Amino acid sequence: MSEASEPFALDLLACNADALLMEGASRERLLAAEPQGEWIRLPDGDPAIRYRDTVLGAPADEASRSRTLQDISTNPHGVVVVFGFGAGHAVRQIRERGDLAVVVVEPSPGILRRVLTQGPTDLGGVPVVIDLQQLKTCWANLARGRSLATLVTTPGYDAAFPDEHAELAALVPDLVGKVQLNENTYRARSRAWLDHVLENVDQLAGAVPAMALADSFEGVPAFILGAGPSLNHNGALLREAARRGIVMAVDVAGKICAHHNAEPQVLVSIESIDLSAQFKDLPWIDRVVRMFSLLSSPQSVRTGRGPWLAFHESMFEFEALNALLKQPGVPVGGSVSTAAFSIALRMGCSPIVLLGQDLAYPGGQTYAAGCSYAGSRARQVGEGRFAFEWSDAARKSHGTSTGPLPDGAAMQLVDAWGGEGKVPTVESFNAFRTWFELNASAVARERPDRRLINASEGGSRIRGFEELRLAELLESMPVRDITSADIAQAARQAARPVRRQDISQWAREQAHLVRGVHVASGRLQRAARAATAVMQDEDPREVRRAFRVLARAEARLANASSQQHMPEAWACSVLQQLTKAQQDRSVSGDVQTNARTALEAECNVTEVVRRAACDLEKRLHALASRHGRKAMPDTEKVRCLC
């Protein structure tokens, strides 16, 4: 097979690397590598790579292919890790299975270079890494809370690279374990988040979507204000920052602004915990633009009379909100500062300046002076571990609904801001920093005109951000005196406020989709019970017929659930408990017994989904009625046998 000639090959390689989201060390190793392996044609005409004495990337035999696809089907919401890019056959087959999270680990940059200089790749959007350390750092962003993974090996790679294969096989379970905390958090909060969404939608009339501000403040500086202890150094400059750009303070940083007699233009919150007690005493709460997520506490949303610019996080369970707000979800990396960064990027702001984003515990400090939680400390104990001493205010705000605050965490040392020495941090901060670094890399590639600056003057270094002192930066900026009212007006010019009839129509549409899940789950439950009964008769024809009906019912429920994810979020905690109980059950050697056990589990799961859909359907119809519908026609009334 002929390959592209220089210099076209270099341009092609760079374009393919961009398409495969290759960044950092992986991209550098790819561009520096010499091509390895050679193209060959297999007897069936498919291309593959011969590396030394091994053929890489040949299509798998039917038995291996079926087994792999079955493993993937078992964990549809997990991450599929493919060892070896090869000619791309394995990745293509996996992508054909639907919207799966896939990442490719290629052990040989030379082989990958050979493949990517052949022609444009058709696998754009599938991230490829060469460096396992990079896989570790970006896993949280890839997994997005998924606590399951399937390792798929492209044919030939385990023989050609046995050590690398063994290392990856040992690493994947460790990576999965590190997102268990996030998965547990999701299980605990998903129903509360959805409950908040429905309650906040009920009060959404008159609000304008925050994401409607796309490019409305092109070239205007945005200061993303966290609550880190570095603000003790430059908090006095916050008033000046507000004159020269837009200060977007995260929820708990509001009191730090008040402490320094500064008024931000925007207050951002995604916190599901009730922070109304903190917000109500802010002297400017009736003027500030409140960019509050629909997933945040309804009590917080009701606090203050400043304009509400609503948004929702980019999570598949809540993508139905795209239709209501007519805007996409906000990319979020687990912290409110990442949400503020994404919104500032959407607004067209430049530079985007991080303040108080320590992402570390320098000297054991946790928050800047003025923050309600400033009395909390992170004390180093033993070898490489923190013990947290939370203030009474932190414990009171956090409450008990989402579990206790952590007592401690493993300590890690990372590069300090300014590049001098190290600062102590923890795993969660590393995840936030990695998110910022990955997004900085994307901004540099896609919007090189945007500047990203870390002016925290403390804490950890965030690669991809310039490091400047705030005082020097402000001196270079003109006075703009943008007000909260200016931002609210720009939002109203970009999009009309949400109307009551919009809420009613959206609620009716979602109720219809939820009804589809409700009906499909009931049919599946009946099909599973029928299949169980037929198995007792031991008539092969009737058994085959019953299982064909069961397969169709499963497909209908999968289709209905793909159109409306809210029932799954509503029932997440119970579904996880059922799944764990099923996994803990011992497997019998008898095929029929195992089949009956599986059908029983399927009945239990569908019952939970059916009840969740029933609950949601009632709430959505009630929401529609409150916002413009006088009565619900008999044909739409919820009939539920729960």
Image (cartoon, rainbow, N blue to C red):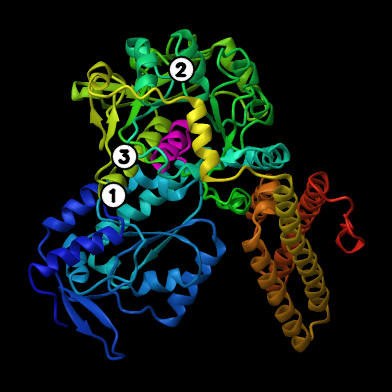
Q: Main secondary structure of the magenta part?
A: helix
| Label 2 sits on residue | 387
| Label 3 sits on residue | 437
For the C terminus, the quadrant is bottom right
Percent of width and height locating residue 329:
52, 47
Under mark 1, the amino acid is Leu
The answer to which image quadrant residue 526 occupies is bottom right
Residue closest to the eye, 208 or 533? 208
Find residue 499 and name its label. none
| Label 1 sits on residue | 132
Under mark 2, the amino acid is Ala
Residue closest to the eye, 71 or 323? 323
Q: How far apart are marks 3 and 1 (CA)?
A: 17 Å
Is 389 above or below relative to 17?
Answer: above
Q: How far apart are marks 3 and 2 (CA)?
A: 28 Å
Left or right relative to 555: residue 243: left
- Identify the magenta region: 332-346
Is 313 above or below relative to 69?
Answer: above
Classify mark 2: residues with Cα within 10 Å, few (<14), some (14-19) or many (20+): some
Residue 327 in sight here: yes
Q: What element carries label 3?
A: helix
For the N terminus, the quadrant is bottom left
Classify mark 1: residues with Cα within 10 Å, few (<14), some (14-19) or many (20+): some
Percent of width and height locating residue 57:
29, 74
Residue closest to the eye, 340 or 136? 340
Left or right relative to 478: residue 408: right
Q: Nearer the viewer, mark 3 or mark 2?
A: 3
